[in-house]
Image (cartoon, helix red, strand yellow):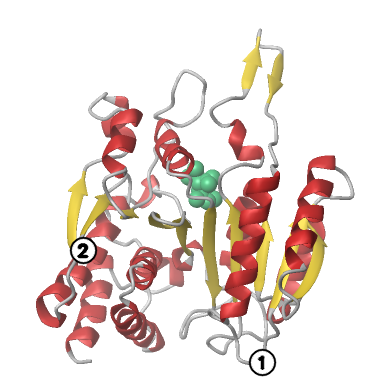
Amino acid sequence: MEIMVLKGDGIGPEIMESSLNILNLLTENYNLKIDPVEFDIGAETISTGKWKLPAIIEEARKFKAILKAPMGHPELRNAGGTEDALDVILGLRSELDLYANVRPVKKLPGVQSVLRGYDEPGSINYTLIRENSEGLYSSHFGGQILRDEVAVDNQIITRKGTERISKYAFELAEKNYNRRKENKKKVTCVDKSNVLKSFVFFRKIFEEVSKDYPGVETQYMYADAMTQYMLFHPRELDVIVTENMFGDVLSDLAAATVGGLGFAYSANLSENTGMFEPVHGSAVDIAGKGIANPTAMILSTTMMLGWLGEAKYSDIVEKALSSVLADGTGTADMGGNVRTKEFTEKVMEKLRNS
Ligand code: IPM
Ligand code: MN
């Protein structure tokens, strides 16, 4: 099967190389049948006009799975003032209707949490489901600045959007996916229904959907209180479902509890298409130095393999990676001095011996 590979900007191409080398090893040594088709798409290729958004989307529609490196350059902006490359990310998410943004939060071996008492691998293990097709972000292609005086962005919450994302969260909770053994099946709905009507609606629809899942506990949190809860009680969490913008903010906070953004990976899913990417950005400040942590990119790749029905391969890569981390191998962000290439080579060595 052909997959679309977007190499992105900054550290993007460097960490994508880690993923491609691993996929290549799986193809050659283990009979995985995947054919990556590489596209040089990122902020630079967009700002030079080499690729335009409609063409990128048309190309993307040909693929079932897209593996995407971080994209964006803080200096390359469009006339509206927002970043060029973000149109691609948000354009792909909305045009392909990738409504479920699935973000696992998992404490891996050998990785330090900023929280005390969470040294054990898996002591933090939950999934944040970010609604990915509406919410405040739906204004990205629509907000306005008038006369240099007035700025407007609207939040859109729909019945359909809230129903399908709530359903996704409950189904995931039922499947026992990624859960600590002692955890209850639970979905936590995060909103600000104490303040905004759109969130009163969000919560109401969530509650309606919850009735179809009597075996799954529900919990309601306001987004502000949730930031504390995630730091004080991460063991209590199983599946979180929230609006797009809240999901964006909370996922970086969640990442900090499991070693930082270098360990935050994700899937953007519809029923038929998946785009897999690290949660972190393109880190242009360290680009080209060969020191980036490829973990989130590699784990996004394993997520893709799992979603494509290749769980066997996704498991062996995750095991190899965990074992490299458990050995104390660390990139600069972890306080170590192992370089991207060397780190990847160690993962591949484990794979060859597994
Ligand atoms: C993320 C990123 C994106 C977002 C950016 C790059 C558009 O921060 O995936 O969390 O804001 O959704
Ligand atoms: Mn983000």
Q: CA distance from mark 1 to mark 2?
A: 36 Å
> Are dots 1 and 2 in contact, CB under 8 Å?
no
Q: Nearer the viewer, residue 307 or 75?
A: 307
Residue at coordinates 26% horizontally, 25% vertically from top-left? 48
Q: Who is closer to the viewer here, 317 or 335? A: 317
Q: Residue at x 21, y 44 (%)?
A: 39
Mark 2 Cα-neighbour bin, 10 Å: few <14, some 14–19, many ≥20: some
Q: Residue furthest top?
A: 147
Which residue is disc 2 drawn over?
A: 20
Q: Quadrant of residue 17?
A: bottom left
- Circle nearer the N terminus (1, 2): 2
Residue 34 visible within the image: yes
Which residue extends farthest front?
212
Q: Judge whether 228 appears above or below 8 on screen.
A: below
Residue 227 appears in the figure: no
Residue 289 location, x and y as percent? 27, 55
Please tell me whether mark 2 sits on a helix, a strand or a loop: helix
> In the image, which is nearer the foreground, mark 1 or mark 2?
1
